[in-house]
Amino acid sequence: MAKTVSGKEIANRISAQLLEEIKRNKLKISLAVVLIGQNPVSLSYIKIKEKKAEELGINFKLFKFHENIQEKKITDLIKRLNIDKKVNGIIIQLPIPRNLNKDKILNSASPVKDVDGLTAKNLGNLFQGERACVQLLP
């Protein structure tokens, strides 16, 4: 028999657990989001992510780039975020404009800080079943 899963209920439960853990352990978490271009759907997703981060007490920093930005400027920023001890996670918002090398940009993120799990290393781990975790979030 099929079972209906409520994504909203799961997301609310996970959010409550995260909030509790953040408060209990007095964690200072910082999320960096890299946006290239002005895709309206991406902008909507980012607003949702920013609101959720605020609810959880997570510092949210958005880095916006014009779609004609030099690829090196993006990868240089991501490399700085990788070594910044104050940044715990990095999201590279998709889609990335076609004039840029998506794989190169995604793989410039440290797999440890890659929130969406889109680096080649993290995708490989997912397909090999190594320490991969998939959750339904809002």
Image (cartoon, grey):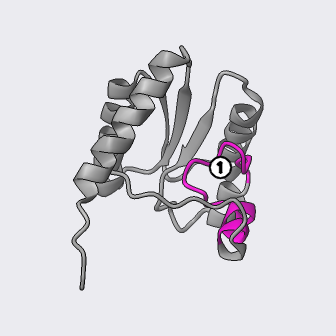
Q: Is residue 93 above or below residue 55?
A: below
Is residue 52 visible from the viewing direction of this image? yes
Q: Which residue is rendered at x = 45% and y = 57% of the image? A: 135
| Residue lying farthest to the bottom in this orientation | 1
- Choose between 31 and 17: the one closer to the eye: 17
Which of the 4 quarters of the picture holds residue 118? bottom right
Residue at image mark 1: 70
Q: Residue at x 72, y 65 (%)?
A: 130
User: Is residue 100 part of the magenta span, yes or no?
Assistant: no
Name the amino acid type tagged 1: Gln
- At x 46% / y 17%, what residue is drawn? 23
Residue 83, image x, y percentages? 78, 31
Q: Please tell me whether residue 128 is drawn above or below residue 24 in the rendered image.
A: below
Start and end of the magenta stretch? 108-126
Residue ranking furthest to the front: 1
Residue 89 sits in which quadrant? top right
